[in-house]
Amino acid sequence: ETGVTQTPRHLVMGMTNKKSLKCEQHLGHNAMYWYKQSAKKPLELMFVYNFKEQTENNSVPSRFSPECPNSSHLFLHLHTLQPEDSALYLCASAASGGDYNEQFFGPGTRLTVL
Amino acid sequence: GQNIDQPTEMTATEGAIVQINCTYQTSGFNGLFWYQQHAGEAPTFLSYNVLDGLEEKGRFSSFLSRSKGYSYLLLKELQMKDSASYLCAVEDSNYQLIWGAGTKLIIKP
């Protein structure tokens, strides 16, 4: 498989559930990102990892917990979410140190919190 | 604060030309990106501008004026498959992308 993949593509969960989103990139990149995309709003950067180290956390609530075990995999662990957390969660990767920071996106996980 | 403005929605006719504008106010500037996102799909890279002027890539061109904090994406010979959202993003002084809310482009036959 090539590019950036995300699983699951769709997720419905209750506010008391615990679930995890998975992202995998097959591009040899060393930077990975989690974004939240809500309807008619700009993409919101949540977390950034460079060489497996977290370099950015944009004031994201602690009910979202990222994990980056290696440069190819990124997880977003979810627990006690709120209905307003319903959105499309996009993963992206990039090759740090290039001429410009072109990001390659996965297809996203459509999350619905009931 | 940091801000990227672009129109919410535009409509154009198949075969025509459309220009999507983007204005920005950011903490520093390290380049401006345009991405295309079809409904239910991932955003995909279209263009990058860091110097003033026009970058042409087939039917798509992107223009940048850093002094005006302004860019546009020009789409020529519109096709139905160009119906999508077009996202403008600026890389700030921390090398993070600041995104606009996107412009939904509707192409009519």
Image (cartoon, rainbow, N blue to C red):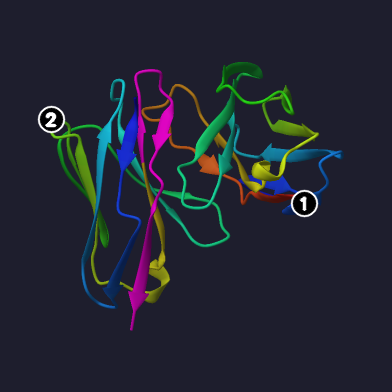
Query: Which numbered disc covers residue A11?
Result: 1
Residue of label 2: B67
Q: Residues within 10 Å of mark 1 (few under 14, many from 20)?
A: some
* Kind of residue at disc 2: Ser
Occupied quadrant, residue B75: bottom left
Occupied quadrant, residue A26: top right
Q: Residue at x 30, y 70 (%)?
A: B11
Let me know if marks 2 and 1 both belong to one chain: no
Of helix, strand and loop, which one carries label 1? Answer: strand
Question: Can residue A98 be found in the magenta stretch?
Answer: no
Label 2 marks a residue whose chain is B
Q: Is residue B48 left or right of residue A34?
A: left
A46 and B55: which one is in front?
A46
* Kind of residue at disc 1: Leu
B43 and A20: which one is in front?
A20
Q: Residue at x 87, y 40 (%)?
A: A17
B102 and A96: which one is in front?
B102
Residue B21 location in percent, x, y?
Answer: 23, 50
Q: Residue at x 40, y 68 (%)?
A: B83
Of helix, strand and loop, which one carries label 2? Answer: loop
Q: Residue at x 58, y 31 (%)?
A: A33
Magenta stretch, residue numbers:
B89-109
CA–CA distance in space, label 2 to label 1:
44 Å
